């Protein structure tokens, strides 16, 4: 009986260690991006001073083209998150409208005192042609932006691009 108890404690301890990695963080143009690799997933917390949308885009080829975007907004008690692809220098479309799929898992979304924060995980490599395959340790170009409306077709108020190491 005691042995079984010890075994359960050990399993719990190893699970804790596997997923208690620290977040790395960048902040620019008032947008904060925090990330950590958890196994085969990237865990992200994104926040900006807006009651509209926030978004991150991975690995554009030029401006916004070919980037894997995850866009989100909080409306009342609902958080909407969408997986998009940079179909042009200045445009993006939802993956599901161009033959791809929605690849992320929402953890939480809040809007408080004019700040929107969303937390989600996404596979490092979803296998979707419209997502950018990522690996821990990679140098990755990310685009960060926010808009002032709960409308993903409206342009950003602020945007920036940064190179990070995953
Ligand atoms: C309907 C949505 C969007 C429209 C119409 C749009 C439009 C544009 C336009 C016209 C530019 C050229 C420069 C400027 O005017 O600021 C631009 C640049 C940029 N956009 Fe967007 N954008 C949209 C969504 C997004 C999203 C969701 C993100 C990121 C997560 C983003 C990130 C950026 C960045 C970082 C640049 C600068 C890129 C560079 O200079 O290399 N945009 N966008």
Image (spheres, helix red, strand yellow):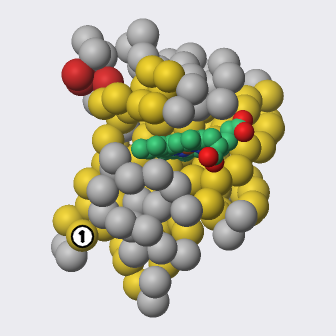
Number of marks present in the image shown: 1
The residue sitting at the bottom extreme is 113
Residue 102 shows up from this direction: yes
Q: Residues within 10 Å of mark 1 (few under 14, many from 20)?
A: some
Q: Is residue 160 above or below residue 165?
A: below
Q: Residue at x 28, y 16 (%)?
A: 98
> Residue 135 falls in which quadrant of the image?
top right
Q: Residue at x 52, y 55 (%)?
A: 156
The residue wearing badge 1 is 75
Expressed as whole percent of the image width and height from the top left, the position of residue 129 reads: 42, 10
Q: Is residue 68 above or below residue 116?
A: above
Residue 121 shows up from this direction: no
> Residue 99 falls in which quadrant of the image?
top left
Q: Residue at x 47, y 61 (%)?
A: 147
Q: Out of 38 and 97, give the one closest to the viewer.
A: 97
- Left or right? Give the position of 79 relative to 48: left
- Left or right? Give the position of 67 relative to 73: right
Q: Out of 52 and 6, give the one closest to the viewer.
A: 52
Q: Out of 87 and 144, give the one closest to the viewer.
A: 87
Helix, strand or loop at disc 1?
A: strand
Expressed as whole percent of the image width and height from the top left, the position of residue 65 reads: 56, 23
Q: Out of 10 and 6, give the one closest to the viewer.
A: 10
Expressed as whole percent of the image width and height from the top left, the position of residue 159 reads: 64, 53
> Which quarter of the rendered picture does the C terminus lie within?
top right
Q: Is mark 1 within 8 Å of ligand 1?
A: no
Q: Is residue 144 above or below residue 50?
A: above
> Residue 111 falls in which quadrant of the image?
bottom left
């Amino acid at each position: 009986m005691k042995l079984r108890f010890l075994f359960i404690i050990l399993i719990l301890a190893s699970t804790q260690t596997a997923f208690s990695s620290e977040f790395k963080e960048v902040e620019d143009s008032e947008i904060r991006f925090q990330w950590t690799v958890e196994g085969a997933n990237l865990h992200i917390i994104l926040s900006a001073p807006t009651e509209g949308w926030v978004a991150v885009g991975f690995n554009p080829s030029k401006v916004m083209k070919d980037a894997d975007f995850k866009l989100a907004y909080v409306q009342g008690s609902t958080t909407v998150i969408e997986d998009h692809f940079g179909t042009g220098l200045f445009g993006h479309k939802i993956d599901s409208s161009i033959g791809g799929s929605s690849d992320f898992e929402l953890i939480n979304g809040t809007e408080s005192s004019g700040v929107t924060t969303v937390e989600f995980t996404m596979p490092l490599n979803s296998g979707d042609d419209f997502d950018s395959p990522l690996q821990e340790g990679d140098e990755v170009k990310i685009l960060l932006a926010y808009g002032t409306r709960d409308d993903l077709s409206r342009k950003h108020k602020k945007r920036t691009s940064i190179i990070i190491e995953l």
